[in-house]
Amino acid sequence: MKELRIEGLDEIVRIDADFYGNSSSSFPSLETLSFNDMKEWEEWECMRGAFPRLQSLSLMHCPKLKGHLPEKLSHLKRLIIEYCEQLVGWIPRAVEVEGVSNSPLEYMRIDCCPGMNIPINHCFHFLEEFRIGDGCDSLTTFPLDLFPKLCYLELEVVAYR
């Protein structure tokens, strides 16, 4: 299986070891994973090595999801997070290539996640498109020299009246 979309499962509160079955590499070929409209989902216990080829991750409209995203997604190219108000962050782990620290992340969109902490560091070296919508209040500086391949940048703040 290369693509998995899980939508509208409002009764799910926790995704843990049962989701992965008997193996830590339950999804060896999965490239795209999407969770959408999971109103009660609070916790994601991601097993190490569960998604060795994951390239695209989308989390949309999961308002109770707490904590951090999985750290070891070394092949991730696309990350979309929308309306996950309680999610606090994701620290991409760099991939070591011939002694040089790199991450293949090329596209990132974060929208309406006010508590999200985005660590602006060398892990975004390959980022070509970066979109931040309303939220991400922790972002106070944006050193462009850390984004040598950036072609598109969108920073949007919506003022409520």
Image (cartoon, helix red, strand yellow):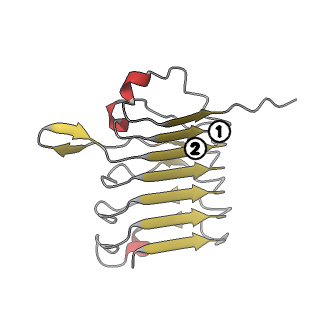
Position of the C terminus by quadrant:
top right
Q: Which residue is drawn at 54% across and 52% down?
A: 80
> Which labelled disc corresponds to residue 12?
none
Q: How far apart are marks 1 and 2 (CA)?
A: 6 Å
In the displayed structure, does residue 124 sit left or right of residue 13?
left
- For residue 87, above or below residue 41: above
State the residue lying farthest toward the front.
151
Residue 1 rendering spot, x and y as whole percentages: 39, 79
Residue 137 showing in the rendered view: yes
Q: Dot 1: what SS? A: loop
**Crowding near the residue tagged with mark 2, few <14, some 14–19, many ≥20 C-alpha atoms within 10 Å:** many
Q: Which of 51 and 108 is in front in this view?
A: 108
State the residue lying farthest toward the left.
98
Residue 107 rendering spot, x and y as whole percentages: 46, 47
The total of numbered circles placed on residues is: 2
Give the residue type at disc 1. Answer: Gly
Corner quadrant of residue 131: top right
Residue 42 rendering spot, x and y as whole percentages: 58, 57
Which residue, given by chain and number where applicable, does mark 1 sit on? 133
In the displayed structure, does residue 97 sit left or right of residue 50?
left
Give the residue type at disc 2. Answer: Ile
- For residue 149, above or below residue 32: above
Q: Which residue is drawn at 66% across and 53% down?
A: 63
> Which labelled disc corresponds to residue 110?
2
State the residue lying farthest toward the right.
161
